[in-house]
Image (cartoon, helix red, strand yellow):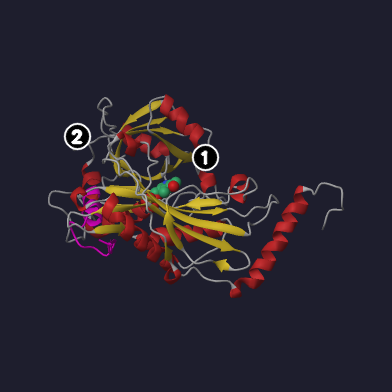
Amino acid sequence: MASTTGTVPSMSDLIQAGANDLKVEMKADSQLQDLDASKLHITQSTSLREVPEPNSEGVWGSKQCSDHMIKVIWTADHGWHAPEIVPYGPLTMMPTASCLHYATSCFEGMKVYRGFDGKLRLFRPDRNCGRLVTSSSRLALPAFDPVELEKLLKAFLGLDGPRWLPKSQAGNFLYIRPTIIGNGEELGVQVPAEVMLFVIAVPWPDLSTGQKPGAPPKAPGLKLLASKDDIRAWPGGFGYTKVSANYGPAFLSHMEGRKRGYDQILWLFGKDFQVTEAGASNFFVVWKTKEGKTELVTAPLTDKIILDGVTRRSVLELARERLSASSKDLPAGVEPLDVVERTFSMLEVEEAWKEGRLVEAFVAGTAYFITPVSAVNFRDTEIEIPMSNGDSGKYTAIVKDWLYDIMYGKVQHPWGVIIEEKE
Ligand SMILES: *Cc1c(COP(=O)(O)O)cnc(C)c1O
């Protein structure tokens, strides 16, 4: 239904116009170009940027990106254009760009690791590339073959890796941020006709200790504040994707938590205080059941209100393989545990704590890696979580070491994907 000349189009007109555009795009889908890494064009930077010292103040600012970036344009009439690696620099877009108004924006968070064997590695990049397609599709932005993005990442990091993560810095990493934005310039409420995929790499501090250089020493473990009225995600929503709209609106709670001396919000859901996840990390608890069994528990993916974290998945897979009663790899002196993905509530955590059954808790994610949790504030009760190793729980430390060894090439594992470097 078109609006007549001289009248302002209503919101429903605008939405209808968007839906019509979408139909046109979908019809033409078969003729559109796929993302194709073999068409990559590289423009090398002629003014290389200063590389900050690891964990220096510049690194804590997390804005000093590496020398280059990946940039790929998609347009509704052509599909994916030839990918480019160009010198790092500002993007230009019109004030009418879709992402500035309608949150047509999603991203990934990954790291590239300098191994103790001198090699550069990504950790399960297929998972991140696939998840970016899920997020993009949730926003009606274009999909692509995740394998092509993985190839582009390898080319980019092969170029910037040697300078930004020198072999002398074994154990250091860069944070990688693949992002998709709707940058088409039309203010109508509709699917954007132009989209940009870009990837930047940035030196990043070690958040798992939370220890800033020069700051007073911080006690080990994260302190979490359980959310009250604020909800991060809900059934039927988009909490299971890394769309930008999940993050900005959470900053208000986060700031409130910080003011009260907590590191992250533990997001609860529903009248029964279901535990979902913590900040931008998945949450795990180890407890003894009333029957005396040890369990590693985390929220399930089935409700689609938590993110399918790559670290979460890896923790679950390793724990099932190496910490279960039947495992041949069970470390000496460690009691086996059952791995459970189910809806659980803060009331259960509180009860376990009161009955002395709480063993440990940790968060898992790329940014925070595996970080022990020392306390959760739930309805003004400070639930102190044991840390049997002093600075961490025992299982937390074991799982963290296993993952660390894979990421930094102390053991060869299919999850650690080696990047060939341009010397
Ligand atoms: C990114 C993220 C995680 C962690 O996912 P990883 O793939 O392990 O980095 C968990 N929860 C939320 C909300 C996130 O945004």
Q: Disc 2 marks which amino acid?
A: Gly
Helix, strand or loop status at disc 2: loop
Q: Nearer the viewer, residue 109 or 90?
A: 90
294 vs 128, left or right, is left
In the image, residue 409 lies in the stretch drawn in magenta? yes
* Side (left or right) of 38 relative to 385: right
Residue 406 on image: x %, y %: 23, 57
> Magenta residues?
400-423
Q: Residue 390: which disc?
A: 2
Locate residue 357, reporting x and y percent: 28, 38
How many callouts does the rendering have?
Answer: 2
Q: Which mark is residue 248?
A: 1
Residue that extends furthest to the front in the rendered view of this protein: 46
| Front position in the image: 123 or 205 | 205
Instruction: From the image, state whether disc 1 or disc 2 is nearer to you.
Output: 1
Q: Rate crowding at label 1 as few (under 14), some (14 to 19) or many (20 or more) other CA atoms within 10 Å.
A: few
Q: Position of residue 50 (x, y in %)?
A: 32, 43
Cα–Cα span, label 1 and label 2: 35 Å
Q: Name the image quarter holding the N terminus.
A: bottom right
- Tell me the element at label 1: helix
Is residue 216 among the parts visible in the rendering?
yes
